Amino acid sequence: MAGYNGVTSADLPVKRQREDELENENGVSASSVSVEMEHKKEPDCISSVIPGWFSEISPMWPGEAHSLKVEKMLFQGKSEYQNVMVFQSSTYGKVLVLDGVIQLTERDECAYQEMITHLPLCSIPDPKKVLVIGGGDGGVLREVSRHSSVKQIDICEIDQMVVDVSKQFFPAVAVGYEDPRVTLHIGDGVAFLKAVPEGTYDAVIVDSSDPIGPAQELFEKPFFMLVAKALRPGGVVCTQAESIWLHMDIIEEIVANCHQIFKGSVNYAWTTVPTYPRQTPFLFNPSHIFSWHMLLLSYNYACANGQSQFSGVIGFMLCSTEGPPVDFKHPVNRIDADKSHSKAKGPLKFYNSEIHSAAFCLPSFAKKVIDSKLSEATFKSI
Amino acid sequence: MAGYNGVTSADLPVKRQREDELENENGVSASSVSVEMEHKKEPDCISSVIPGWFSEISPMWPGEAHSLKVEKMLFQGKSEYQNVMVFQSSTYGKVLVLDGVIQLTERDECAYQEMITHLPLCSIPDPKKVLVIGGGDGGVLREVSRHSSVKQIDICEIDQMVVDVSKQFFPAVAVGYEDPRVTLHIGDGVAFLKAVPEGTYDAVIVDSSDPIGPAQELFEKPFFMLVAKALRPGGVVCTQAESIWLHMDIIEEIVANCHQIFKGSVNYAWTTVPTYPRQTPFLFNPSHIFSWHMLLLSYNYACANGQSQFSGVIGFMLCSTEGPPVDFKHPVNRIDADKSHSKAKGPLKFYNSEIHSAAFCLPSFAKKVIDSKLSEATFKSI
């Protein structure tokens, strides 16, 4: 749930695009800023469209706005890669925002972190080596570390500020870093994957930003090929895969791509997260949103054009490489019965074996599209 | 999904409360108003907080706002019971709003209507007599009428305007009224239930407003007792039962109440509906919101106090009376395979047998509370 895709190599457009555009823009300070403000003393940089509220909007998905009331601004900064913001909301606890997009709220982060982690790790017996790409907030690490079979947890997150901010403001999330099995690599996820010896990991979890906009290629074949190469035979990947209510066209394409790369099984699962999906909500390139003034400009533009949307659900692609077959729908690990590794992290709040299987049951409109894509892809690959 | 609870008898406070308060308020016109406006020519009655947007907010659930862009206002009126409004949104199609609360959108109504109907009707063999309380828009009727075993469909809706508006603006929803098995009773749901001979129905579907505020008693024992009396032995009821993300305290109470009344089985299921839950979002009594000016006052109040919330999910209580046992989790009718009665209504978009069973799988935080309440209630009833 770190929100940064972790990929900025020359193979992918993220960093390149941002650098190009930065070169064309003058007079914009890129220095880090941290602010602490008193309750009720809202800074003028908060949206004046709804004074005192944070509004997440999207130029790509028109017609809906989702606003959380800002009780207190806790942190605003700019890293080398993105704007980082933390505020206290009135009902969702503390909220982490990267480039204007909600990454996690204390209230509902459990659903995302637990599902993106335990759906893959409970589907294979005794996972030992796990790689997390993105996920700098540490929430996925917290969940991975509940698995006693795991011996090695690598995480590749590009933005040190996300790690630091999470440790400062979200200790219950960043607690994942305290596990001695964790090794943090600050860097580019694609470069990291390229350097990984073939067949290293039992599971890869891609806690990325959205598969539209700059991170689009993270959901395309070249990236999936790198992931497949890094996995052992019968290894599994779980990657964030958007909302069935909003992006069946994108999901359709991801399913087709995955089915061509992963020769084991390919499945789509979903869960409820009230404050999702996170989006790339800006008129501007995200790296150019340096202040709430610019956020407001984006917001006004979106309002004027009827833009932005949410759905309350988020999906995951779950795939396995050729090898020992993986039946994702029927978990083989019952993490909910394993209490040995959960003391420091508290009990599971969301995941259990029943909700694991239920996550693969799709509404008819989504099932029809996904099943059809899987059949097509199978046909093509014969 | 009619939004009106259909209960205004002396036993319940809805109508009484509204009448009392109306008596204390002077100078408020209660006459019906209908307006048609051109695209882009927004009336000044639309919220000026986000100009041109409809914002659903709640004084009861603070901290979040959910806004849909109004492309065109299609209808505004006031019935004897509530304000009725229809607008064209930019992405969710036409939207029906009662007393400022979203009741249905063309885009996601399928999820609610199909689940609230087929969860009960697919759980018993050959349902013949079905009662719908509320549901004036006709969407539940449309779904009930897919069941070829059904011989009689009674609906008790208090507000004729909801029926008329649905027929005018939502023909794909109101199509349910075209089924010759349907008899519409305009009136009070509780009075209707009191007059029903014992054991009349195989299934009762309560398409009500929220179990907080005026409709609270619809989720309490006296109402459930009337429903139980109207059902045959082994008959089933399905009633809207809020969101696990927002109201576990309310759900807990409903579960306990139902378990005391329904001696068959008592279950909680849930589904995703992006624009839900609908709420009672007003500072004022809903019957006093006569215009967008007042809606704006409410909205401003809510903004100032950090109020309103959404979750993207809605739940259902599914109970059966003593008699032939009902296993709600394993449907006995496969409506998704029955195409004989769906031609005029189009195919099912959301419901299938898999999603039926999955709807009963709860996240751990909700499962814990509900299971505990069921155990307690069982203990007490021994």
Image: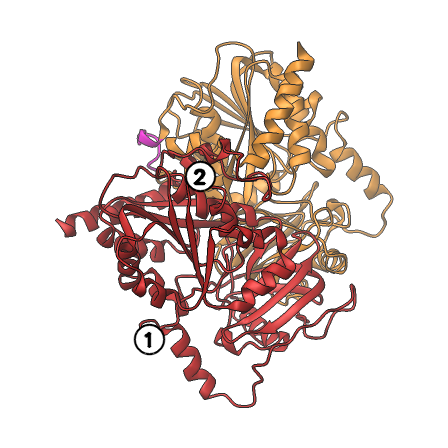
Chain colours: A red, B orange
Q: Which residue lies furthest to the front in this view?
A: A180
Give residue A367's quadrant in the image.
top left
Question: Residue at image x 41%, y 83%?
Answer: A20
Cα distance between the residues tagged 2 and 1? 55 Å
Q: Quadrant of residue B187?
A: top right
Residue B87 percent across, percent down from the top left = 56, 56
Residue at (61, 58) in percent of width and height: B35
Q: Mark 2 lies on which chain?
A: B
Q: Is mark 2 on a helix, strand or loop?
A: helix
A191 versus B121 height, above or below: below
A269 lies left or right of A343: left
In what quadrant of the picture does the N terminus of chain B appear?
top right
Q: Name the residue under label 2.
A: B175
- Residue lying at 42% horizontally and 40% vertically, measured from the top left: A149
Which amino acid type is shown beneath numbered disc 1? Ala
Q: Residue A330 versus residue B136: which sits nearer the camera?
A: A330
Residue B291 vertical placement versus A60 (above, below): above
Asked whether residue B237 is drawn in magenta, I would say: no
Q: Are marks 2 and 1 on the same chain?
A: no
Main SS class of the magenta portion in the image: loop
Q: Say which of marks 2 and 1 sits in front.
A: 1
Residue B337 is covered by the magenta coloring: yes
Q: Is mark 1 on a helix, strand or loop?
A: loop
Q: In which quarter of the image is the C terminus of chain B?
A: top right
Provide residue A30's location: percent of width, then percent of height: 56, 81
Q: Give the range drawn in magenta.
A: B336-343
Q: Which amino acid does label 2 sit on?
A: Val
* Residue B188 shows in this picture: no
Q: Residue furthest left?
A: A382
Report the residue marked by disc 1: A10
- Residue A188 screen position, x and y as percent: 40, 68
Q: Which quarter of the figure has residue B23? A: top right
